[in-house]
Amino acid sequence: MDELNELYYQGMLKKVEPSPLRSTLSLKEGRLWLKEAATAFKNGTYRSARVCTYLAFLHTARSVLLRDGVQEKNTLCLVPYLKKYNHKGHLEEKWPQILDWIFNLHNQDKHQFQAMYTPEEVEMAIDYGHEFIQRINLLLKETGTLPRTMTIHPITENEKVK
């Protein structure tokens, strides 16, 4: 948690208005990018599949921050932010690790010439992407700020506690 506090202190993370709508849209965007990654993989365009997979993970992870009302200045802040949920027992340790692995692959793509990868590695990343989206969707449901009944049946003026 100290790492997360340090990121807030440095201004790499900041509190913003929570947005369940933007969170949902970001998760949807993640699904769209992963679908495109799978199509690119089937067509044999592995570099494109890898970039699309990165974007799928990015948008999916970002959906948690958007829901929580947090904005990151650097995508690498998403890993320690998800670790917060791991430390609280809401998310398995492997997911921040896989996210970090995906971000490292993307970093290689950006900063190295002819980054080396195998079709098996790209396929594994896509498979993890499907699991990641499902797991983050479940995390969002399990850790929502309002009980589910509150979002379905909002309190009316007459029902407010005095």
Image (cartoon, grey):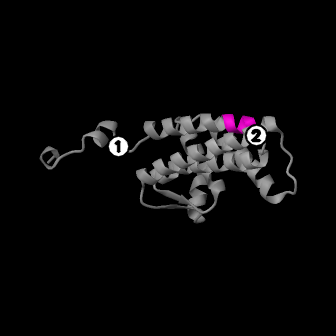
Disc 1 versus disc 2: nearer the observer = 2
Instruction: Write the residue at 62% across / 42% down.
Output: 35
Label 1, on which residue? 146
Which is nearer the N-term, disc 1 or disc 2?
2
> In the drawing, what numbered circle is on residue 162?
none
SS under mark 1: loop
Q: Is 126 in the magenta?
A: yes
Label 2, on which residue? 122
- Of all residues shown, which one is farthest toward the front? 43
- From the top left corner, tell me how far across and down residue 127 is, in percent: 67, 34
Q: Left or right of 158: which side holds 112? A: right
Q: Note whether 67 is above or below 138 in the view shown.
A: below
Residues at circles 1 and 2 in contact by the CB criterion of under 8 Å: no
From the image, give the main secondary structure of the stretch colored magenta: helix
Instruction: Write the residue at 66% across / 54% down.
Output: 76
Q: Which residues are magenta?
A: 123-127
Instruction: Write the residue at 55% across / 49% down.
Output: 29
- Of all residues shown, which one is farthest toward the left? 158
- From the top left corner, tell me how far across and down residue 78 is, in percent: 61, 51
Label 1 vs label 2: CA separation?
A: 38 Å
- From the top left corner, tell me how far across and down residue 102 is, in percent: 71, 45
- Of all residues shown, which one is farthest toward the bottom? 11
